[in-house]
Image: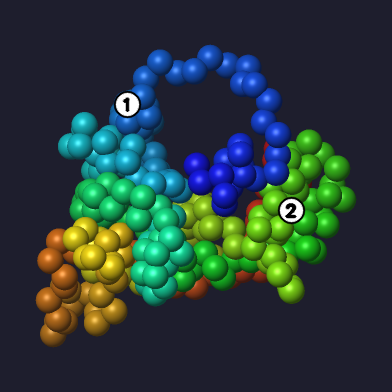
Amino acid sequence: HAPGVHGASGLGGPVLHEPATAVAGEDAAGFIVDAARRTEGLWLVAVGPFTNVALALRRDPTLAERLAGISFMGGATGPGNRAPVAEFNVWADPEAAAVLIGSGARPLRMAGLNLTRQLLLDEAFLAELWAAGTPLADFCAEAVAFALGRYGSGTRTAPAHDVCAVLAVTHPHLVRHEERAVAIELRGEHTRGMTVVDERGVGTAPGAAEPPAGASLVDVGYAIDAAGARAVLLDVILHPD
């Protein structure tokens, strides 16, 4: 879980207690498949490397069509973070990302770095969490404080990457998506893990250029109402019921 980025627990500063429930007997891919079979209209939100998602899609070829949609945090339309043109979640398992992109799931919404770096948390947001004084707010405050310490210099802000993929489902009006042909680079010496987003136009549009080989249509996030997103996030934390 990249301790250099997310801390020893995987969630930054908070100290996690031992779970009160037993570990589920099934593996992650099986859990995804079974959950989609049990619950009609289920959205899958993927916010880490996509290995388990790809395994689930291969295990059940009908999974993509039974899901209401997939929203994922990963990729970028421009610079990466783990490599010059590769974002970490895609870079960690590009083959799995290619399975996800090519799954046929619709809608398929992408929250890449170009989007997630627009949703910044700051000292003012942290102060509101500390002021609330609830267990959940304190837990989140410790995570935000850790992130500000890692990313922060000068203005001390930190992007809320994964939140964007969730809001694309729960509050889609906050995110502007545009349909693009997207492919995952699997072989490039310097570009493996790159999310190749065809900005020339959707391949099915009249007169559009041919999309890259292996590309699929994806709703790529380009802009987010950052103030509105922070307000939603704060409200959920302070009023979880």
Residue farthest to the bottom, as pictured? 207
Left or right position of 21 against 113: right
Residue farthest to the front, as pictured? 189
**Structural crowding at the residue carrying mark 1, measured as other residues with C-alpha within 10 Å and reported as few (<14), some (14–19) or many (≥20):** some
Residue at 63% across, 17% down: 20
Q: Label 1 is placed on what type of residue?
A: Gly
Residue at numbered disc 2: 145
Query: In this picture, is 197 found above or below 33?
Result: below
Residue at 75% across, 48% down: 141
x%, y% of residue 206?
14, 81
Left or right position of 231 against 172: right
Residue at 82% across, 55% down: 128
SS at mark 2? Answer: helix
Sequence-first tag of 2 and 1? 1
Can residue 182 be seen in this snapshot? no
Q: Quadrant of residue 50?
A: top left
Residue at numbered disc 1: 30
